[in-house]
Image (cartoon, grey):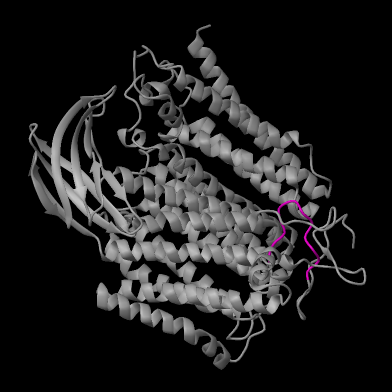
């Protein structure tokens, strides 16, 4: 038997194992949930993961060994591609990317099965949903992809992956992070469906999923930012976000997940918004699946999407079936959801969080309409309609500015509510600082109103956070010096402090976006070797034009000396021609500082003596990447398990021997995955959900 057949059979066997294992686990967990029994053995979760690992390992072995008898390797592999990009070739094409998608999903399923968070009945149905989802994607990969098909005759070499995917190390980081973030949303979805099935629609499922939601949100945030950085550093157009349909496909679930993280606090503190939280958890995962449909169906034109495949209609049917199923469950459990409960007085933190949620969902719907409208218009009338950045900027910017204002006011409000006059008194100083910043920027660097308002609101948010935190530290601890009070407050209010870190990162990102959008300067110029000129405010000298033959491409590069305000540097933008793909790729050169970037793209060359360059100054772009790192760090800090004062308990011992909730729980924070949630204080007039079968009363 030939080696090609062994590899093909091994890969197909692994996929079949993943599919059959997930299907078997779905039936076993559903049976256990129906009978109120304990969970099945852990091997039921390990079996699909073993199959997914085997399939991915087999595909990677075929790529690394250059087994061109495999169809996927023949179409996407190349002997000239380095080891790193050979590994990442797996997810550079549609079929292989589904393998990575399946692997990440089965890892999540095993983690949740092993940790077993929440009551037995809730957990059992959630695992049934997760395994059912894994079975669907395993079957989709097994029956619609051709990773392990063989070809004859066997070619001596392949074309290699898309040249754009072998020009930056983010290829090995961005897709796995994005998939991990999107698939992480399957956990709150599964528990929301389980809550509807069991009728346990109170705060229990919210406590269970909040940490998982934070993990997925943080990873998805990192994935989106790495993707924006990759686009900025590789494509040569000087931007980082183009409102591309596939970019929007990752932004929409991120917006709804952000709303879910905030609204979970309202349900835990006020017993309000149960139906809203269930809807957000479901919508987040459905949007993630919709994004996968847009990427894999070929219905949208995008540099990020795969070619048309048979997967698209199946994915659309899956999303539709999930949506219909959830709607039916909501109708069946309408009596358990109860009458809408107020989030609090008008001037309260609950009301501010509700408004925050509405704005985030409105923003997600705005992006959804702009993304799907061309598809709907073409389907109805046959006319091709495009929705470009002007629509998104005009619709999204005002909503984003109101959200920024809420970030300043919301944390200053109490849950019980307070007079509007008291709140106005506290916001006077932050608003005054914001007004001063607007005035200073207007006088020194005038711009359109939107960036000026953004800078003012950013200053308002930062001032409000500093003043509010200082007041809480001062009131919370009067023992010790002022230098020790802050560390003690941070230790006892870790989740709140982590939220402030995330909000600080958001402010930095917003300032970076506003600055780079409002003050960027771009100019094109043709230079001769030895010639110096001011291009876009940058002193630029063309030193030489060089041509180099690479393993799989011809490279034409220029050596430039650039000087922006006494900060000289040498830059080497290039053009690379890939004969296998008949494609030329621009490789820009970027010189970054704290205040901004000099971004140079080589457009064309004339012999060895002239080059046409596109030079741009992009102020504050680095703030976007730095602010994104701060956001991810804050999310990691929030999800990190807290230190326990008693073995096996998340509660602190109160004086007199009684146990109470820790400071983190008192602040409305969730417990970590796998820990038993503390008993919640049920607001008056809200019925406590029944205890699951077999659990202590």
Quadrant into which the C terminus falls = bottom right
Residue 452 % position (x, y): 32, 75
Quarter-wise, where is residue 390 in the image? bottom left
Name the one closer to the observer, 521 or 8.
Answer: 521
Identified at 65% across, 63% down, the residue is 495
Identified at 56% across, 37% down, the residue is 102
- In this view of the protein, can residue 584 be seen by the observer? yes
Q: Is residue 669 above or below residue 649?
A: below
Total label count? 0
Left or right of 317: which side holds 77? left
Q: Is residue 195 above or below residue 339?
A: above
Left or right of 330: which side holds 619? left
Name the outermost residue toward the top.
1
Q: Which residues are magenta?
A: 669-680
Residue 112 % position (x, y): 69, 46
Q: Is residue 238 above or below residue 354?
A: above
Name the one closer to the observer, 638 or 609.
Answer: 609
Residue 135 % position (x, y): 61, 38
Quarter-wise, where is residue 251 in the image? bottom left
Quarter-wise, where is residue 558 in the image? top left
Identified at 59% across, 22% down, the residue is 13
Name the one closer to the observer, 242 or 321.
Answer: 242
Residue 648 % position (x, y): 84, 53
Is residue 172 part of the magenta span, yes or no? no
Identified at 65% across, 59% down, the residue is 210
Name the one closer to the observer, 529 or 73.
Answer: 529
Name the outermost residue toward the right.
656
Dominant SS type (magenta): loop
- In this view of the protein, can residue 354 be seen by the observer? no
């Amino acid at each position: 038997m030939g080696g090609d057949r062994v590899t093909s059979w091994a890969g197909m066997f692994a996929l079949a194992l993943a599919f059959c294992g997930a299907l078997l686990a779905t039936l076993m967990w559903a049976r256990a949930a129906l009978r109120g029994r304990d969970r099945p053995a852990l091997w039921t979760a390990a079996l699909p993961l073993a199959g997914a690992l085997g399939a991915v390992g087999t595909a990677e072995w075929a790529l690394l060994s250059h087994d061109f008898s495999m169809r996927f390797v023949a179409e996407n592999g190349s002997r000239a591609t380095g080891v790193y990009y050979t590994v990442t070739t797996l997810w550079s094409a549609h079929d292989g990317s589904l393998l990575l998608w399946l692997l990440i999903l089965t890892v999540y399923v095993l983690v949740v099965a092993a940790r077993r968070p929440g009551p037995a009945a809730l957990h059992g149905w959630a695992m049934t949903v997760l395994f059912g989802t894994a079975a669907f994607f395993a079957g989709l990969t097994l029956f619609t992809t051709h990773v392990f098909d063989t070809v004859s005759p066997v070619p001596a070499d392949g074309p290699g992956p898309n040249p754009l995917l072998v020009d930056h190390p983010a290829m090995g980081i961005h897709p796995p992070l994005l998939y991990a973030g999107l698939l992480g949303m399957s956990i709150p979805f599964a528990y929301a469906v389980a809550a509807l099935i069991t009728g346990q629609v109170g705060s229990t499922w919210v406590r269970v999923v909040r940490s998982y939601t934070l993990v997925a949100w943080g990873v998805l945030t990192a994935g989106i930012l790495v993707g924006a950085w990759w686009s900025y550093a590789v494509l040569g157009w000087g931007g980082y976000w183009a409102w591309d349909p596939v970019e929007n496909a990752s932004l929409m679930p991120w917006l709804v997940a952000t709303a879910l993280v905030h609204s979970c606090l309202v349900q835990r503190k006020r017993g309000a918004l149960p139906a809203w939280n269930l809807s957000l958890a479901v919508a987040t995962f459905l949007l993630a699946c919709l994004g996968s449909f847009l990427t894999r169906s070929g219905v949208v034109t995008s540099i990020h999407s795969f070619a048309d495949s048979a997967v698209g209609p199946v994915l659309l049917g899956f999303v539709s079936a999930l949506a219909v199923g959830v709607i039916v469950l909501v109708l069946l459990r309408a009596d358990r959801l109860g009458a809408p409960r107020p989030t609090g007085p008008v001037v309260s933190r609950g009301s501010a969080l509700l408004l925050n949620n509405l704005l985030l969902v409105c923003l997600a719907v705005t992006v959804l309409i702009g993304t799907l409208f061309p598809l709907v218009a073409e389907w109805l009338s046959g006319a091709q309609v495009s929705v470009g950045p002007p629509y998104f900027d005009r619709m999204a910017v005002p909503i984003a500015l109101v959200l920024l204002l809420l970030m300043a006011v919301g944390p200053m409000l109490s849950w019980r509510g307070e007079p509007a006059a008291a709140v106005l008194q506290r916001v006077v100083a932050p608003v005054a600082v914001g007004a001063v910043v607007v005035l200073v920027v207007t006088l020194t660097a005038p711009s359109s109103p939107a960036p000026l308002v953004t800078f003012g609101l950013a200053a308002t948010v930062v001032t409000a956070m500093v003043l509010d935190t200082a007041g809480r530290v001062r009131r919370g601890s009067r023992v010790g010096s002022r230098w020790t009070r802050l560390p003690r407050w941070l230790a006892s209010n870790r989740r709140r402090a982590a939220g402030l870190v995330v909000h600080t990162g958001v402010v930095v990102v917003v300032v970076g976006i506003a600055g780079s959008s409002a003050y960027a300067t771009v100019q094109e110029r043709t230079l001769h070797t030895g010639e110096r000129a001011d291009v876009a405010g940058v002193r630029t000298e063309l030193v030489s034009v060089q041509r180099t033959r690479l393993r799989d491409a011809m490279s034409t590069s220029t050596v430039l000396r650039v000087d922006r305000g006494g900060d000289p540097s040498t830059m080497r933008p290039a053009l690379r021609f890939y004969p296998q793909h008949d494609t030329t790729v621009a490789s820009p050169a970027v010189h970054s500082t704290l205040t901004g970037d000099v971004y140079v793209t080589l457009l064309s060359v004339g012999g060895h003596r002239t080059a046409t360059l596109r030079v741009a100054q992009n102020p504050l772009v680095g703030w976007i990447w730095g602010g994104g790192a701060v956001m991810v760090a804050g999310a990691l800090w929030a999800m990190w398990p807290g230190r326990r004062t008693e073995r096996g308990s998340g509660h602190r011992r109160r004086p007199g021997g009684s146990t109470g909730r820790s400071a983190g729980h008192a602040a409305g924070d969730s417990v970590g995955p796998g820990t038993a949630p503390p008993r919640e204080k049920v607001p008056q007039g809200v019925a406590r959900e029944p205890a699951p079968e077999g659990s202590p009363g």
